[in-house]
Amino acid sequence: MNTIRRIVEFAKVKTFAFKCIAIGAALALVASACVIQLASTQLIGGRQTAQAATANRTLTVTLSAKRGRILDANGSVLAQSVERYTIVANPEAAQEFEPITCNDNTRDYCHEIDGKPVGATGASAVGRLLAKVLDMNAMELGADLSGTGQYVILKKDVTPQVKRSIEALHLGGIVWGELSSERLYADGDLMGALLGGVNDNGDGVAGIEQVENKTLTGTDGHETYQRGNGGEEIPGTMTESVAAKNGNDVTLTIDRDVQWYVKKALKEAESKYGAAWAIAVVQDVQSGEILALADSDEVQAGTDAAKMSPSRAVSETFEPGSVGKVISMSGYLQTGLHKMSDQWSVPDHITQKGQTYKDSFDHGTERWTLAGILQNSSNVGMIMAGENYPDEQRYEYLTKFGIGQPTGLNLPGESSGLFTSPSAWDLRTRNTILFGQGGYTVNALQLNNVVATIANKGVKQQQSIIRSTTDANGKTTETKKGEATHVVDEKVASDMMNAMESVAESYNKFIKVDGYRMAAKSGTAEVQGSDGTPLSSNISDYSVVIPADNPRYAVTVVMKDPNDVFGGLTAGPVSAQICEFLMQKYEVPVSSPRKNAIPVTW
């Protein structure tokens, strides 16, 4: 029995040992697994976790390039981009925001509104803190911050001062400012639609902003770094930095002072003469540079109106009226058909092939030279002188003077006008085209370049409005100009200037600049009205060169529906105002007395 009892007790002890061994083995296995997992976490997963944390902290920030400036001929700023910020926020962070109560220990980073507790938490609290600084409704801001995601734009184009005020609210990591820019224009409607404007992306979409968009636009840069919990850059973590390259400045040929005076004169004339609109061009005769290109429209640069409607000064076309006689008469002389001293007996009306043509005023048969025909703006005399002037040459010289041709300024909305070929002319048009009515229309730039070509000894300069560009390093590149073209001989141009000076003298009682000789031509044309009714509106224009003895400037003023239809009585006095300003501003020497005037009668 003892032996059996010992065997049973031994078995119990052995079973207990086996259990202990088994439990120990299991515990050892678990411990090994924990050690392996710990090692894996520290040696393998730790690196991945660290990389994930670094990636979460890493931010790439765009460094916005500044758009180039637009300057006038003297360096005055017409358009520029200024430092502005887009205020953005992280809605998820805003919703977790807990304001810190202000006391002596937390004064440097606490939150309060006008010395009082915020009175809310989360997005609502952030909205309340921002409302006064951004001048926005707190509830609307709270709603914007209650959405999903980590990025929402709260307000654009805020000043650096506003950005600094937001930084003082201690909302780092929740609200911050991203650098942007705002396009500002110095003089409102001075060059309105001519300057045009930019869209929300800062791209030029109208006017000179559009023409020179590629030149004005810079290249953005960027920085990559890690940021702390407050959104600030962690020192020493910058891994990449590419500087922004600002756009180039563009310098115009426009003189701001001249543009201002011309604009003022046009607005006053529009009111004085009851005109629908007025346009003016001022051009340097020798270089072809445009010193002023203005209209009476009151369009603010950068506005929707400036972006949607081109400048009237380049888009409006019209029949030139009697200023067109300058082209025809130049052709008479250049082809050898006539000399300026040739003589005619000119009645006030004439009938050819069933078509009757009249002068603008009644008169008996006058003994006029070709110069006299121009001075008296005789339509009948032009037809009589053009009897042997073939249609092909009529068309040729209109083309040579730039009719139907682009000005080369490439301004948006510019119209080259209508210009029909001789095959489309009827019996009446082939004659009225000699005095600027029917067959073609022009814009103010084209018309001004006609008289500028005569003043420049018969050489037609390519008009220009962009003088140069200057890059971010200060290197200036002059704009390449188009080639000048020879239109008529110098002798022809001289005789035309002589006859045009006689025209100007005939208006000397009310169109003059004391001390200076002028050469000019006035014009009047009946055109279609704004309601589509034929010949129900009038165009009055006046083109002048000053000084006539040493040509410097060509000026053209055009008005629609003034209360007196004759260009010499409306557009003429306005052009004289502009000419007087030019002579004073540029201190042009006074003219010498006139000699050797070609006779206008015989």
Image: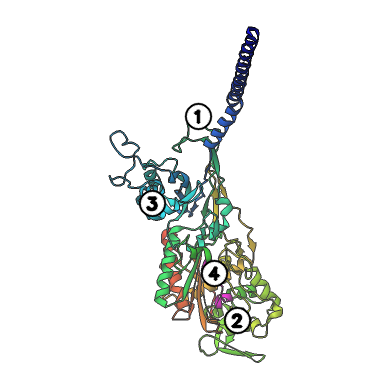
Q: Residues within 10 Å of mark 1 (few under 14, many from 20)?
A: few
Q: Residues within 10 Å of mark 4 (few under 14, many from 20)?
A: many
Where is mark 4, residue-wise? 444
Residues in magenta?
A: 310-325
Residue 384 lies, in percent from the top left, at: 62, 84
Residue 304 lies, in percent from the top left, at: 49, 63
User: Is there a contact, CB below 8 Å, between mark 1 and mark 4?
Assistant: no
User: Is there a contact, CB below 8 Å, between mark 4 and mark 2?
Assistant: no
In the picture, measured across the screen, residue 262 lies left or right of residue 16, that is left
Q: What kind of element bears circle 1?
A: loop
Where is mark 3, residue-wise? 134
Of pointers 1 and 4, the one earlier in the residue sequence: 1
Where is mark 1, residue-wise? 236
In three-dimensional space, the C-alpha distance between marks 4 and 3, rounded to whole angstroms, equals 47 Å
Mark 1: amino acid: Gly
In the picture, measured across the screen, residue 257 lies left or right of residue 323, that is left
User: Is there a contact, CB below 8 Å, between mark 3 and mark 1?
Assistant: no
